[in-house]
Structure formats: C-alpha cells, structure tokens
Image (cartoon, rainbow, N blue to C red):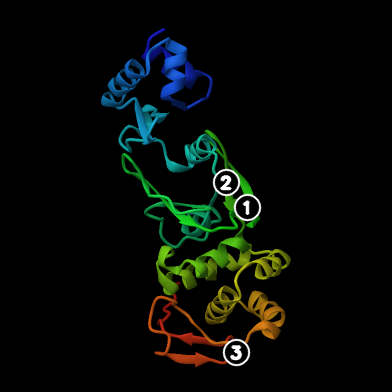
Amino acid sequence: MDISAYIDSLAARGRYHFTTREVGRALELSPVAARAAVRRQRQKSRVAMPYRGFFVVVPPEYRSLGCLPADQFVPQLMEHLGLAYYVGLLSAAALHGAAHHAPMVFQVVVATNRLAIRCGKVRVQFTARRNVMDVPTEQRNTPRGVLRLSTPAATAFDLVGYPHAAGGFSNIATILSELQEKVDVREFLEEANRAPLPWAQRLGYVLDRVGAESLAVPLLAQVAPRIRDYVPLRARKPARRGQRDARWRVIVNERIEVDL
C-alpha cells in the first residue's frame, strides 16, 4: 500500500484524519519518509495540516477551502491533543441559530491560552476559560463525528464574559435578542451561580436593552442580593466614563446599538 491508497482506505472507512506516526506504522516508513510522503499529498491538496503532525483528508468538495471545515476536525484534534474543549461564543451562537452574521473564525474554548490555527481558508481561534469542564455543553452531530458546544445559557454568559472575542456589546446584544428564545431559564439561573458575578451584571443589563424580561427578571432576583459594586460594561475601557445603571450596577462605558 502507498500513501495515496492509505488515504483512500481511511476515507472509505469514514475516517478523515491521521497522524505522521500512523502513516509510518501503516506503511512501514521511517519518520522522515512518512513526512515526505504526506508532504507530497499536501502539495496535491489531498490532505491539509491544521496542526503539526496531525492531518485531515480533504474531499474534492472542500479543495477550494484548502481544509476540512473546522467543525469536522476540531473534535478529533482536541482528542489527539488530550484537551477538554467546547465550541463557544459566536460559533456556538451560530450553531444555535442566533448569529446575525456568519462568524469569520471558528471559536473554541479550552482551559489555557493557545495560538490560533490556520488551515487553508479555515481559522480556529481559542479562548481560555479555566473551568472549561464545568461549563454545560450539548452534542451536535457533524459529517465526521460529534461536536461539543456550549448550551444557549452558557453561551449567553460567555458572550458577555469575552466581549473582545464576540464583536463588542452591540453585536452581543443583537445575538442575545435572537438567542434568548433558545435559553432554558432553569439552566440559565444555574449558570448564573457558576459564572463570575460581573458577568451576570453585564448580561442582565444587555438583556434589559433587548427586552428579554423572561431572563432578566429571574436573573436579577437571583443575583441582586450579591451585587455590591459597580462594574464597567466593557472592562478594557475607562471605567469611570459613562452613565450608571442602578438596576444592575453597571457603568455604561460602551454604547449599544442593536441590529435587528
């Protein structure tokens, strides 16, 4: 069997990823020879390398993309790296049907910071959250396997927790105006207990702005006894500039315009 036949045999079994070590074992090649064989297939655009030593088979329909779509290799890559993960933020919102615009990158949440991945025209961006294992997720089937993504409730909190990765609060408000219908109130309040209190304050303020009373009212009832200090809406902007919202104790230092 040569490298081309090996790739065909993987695809025939529904497996679209492999490593250099697996190629070497299957074809009885040295590491140098295995890398050379895979490199020739990359030059023919038959395979792509989203991560060093980890390759994906690129079917003809994705040759113009130069890679498999991210949702079709991220679960396998995370398993290869031994990393807990979930698809979050704008990508999770899109999968829940609440993205006003298609995300330009595929966003994955892991425990520690990692560099972004580029594979052809596909880009995977990582966001670090230490308690990644505690965040509630659900499974979504893809043509190549099963994807883990944050629930609508967890996604709502992540959006306000990482606004720099979510396009700012105007974009977050637009997404929440659509996502609110998918959020289970019980799960939402449970997540409020796990998330940092400032996230709940910011989220409550934005929910008020988009008229999501079904979520804002029970959230305020749950977190109001714990709120002591004012927090800036956008943590990375000057905190003292802006009006103060007494209901959520939020310093409104970023203007919100909802694009409905």
User: Relative to the observer, which residue lies in front, 120 or 214?
Assistant: 120
Left or right of 17 on screen, residue 225: right
Q: Are marks 3 and 1 in contact (CB under 8 Å)?
A: no
Q: Are marks 1 and 2 in contact (CB under 8 Å)?
A: yes
Which amino acid type corresponds to the residue marked 1 in the rendered image? Met
Which amino acid type corresponds to the residue marked 3 in the rendered image? Arg
How far is the residue under mark 2 from the one under mark 3? 37 Å
How far is the residue under mark 3 from the one under mark 1? 32 Å
Label 2 sits on residue: 84
Which amino acid type corresponds to the residue marked 2 in the rendered image? Ala
For image coordinates 71% across by 66% down, the residue present is 190
Q: Vertical placement of 16 versus 240: above or below? A: above
Dot in front, 2 or 3:
2
Residue 91, position in %: x, y?
48, 54
Residue 213, position in %: x, y?
64, 79
Residue 192, position in %: x, y?
66, 70
Dot in front, 3 or 1:
1
Left or right of 106 on screen, residue 138: right
The local crowd at label 2, few if under 14, some if 14 to 19, many if 20 or more residues have their Cα within 10 Å, is: some
Q: Vertical placement of 167 versus 69: above or below? A: below
How far is the residue under mark 1 from the one under mark 2? 7 Å
Q: Secondary structure at mark 1?
A: helix
Residue 78, position in %: x, y?
51, 40
Q: Decide which of tag 2 and tag 3 comes sooner along the chain.
A: 2
Q: Residue furthest right?
A: 186
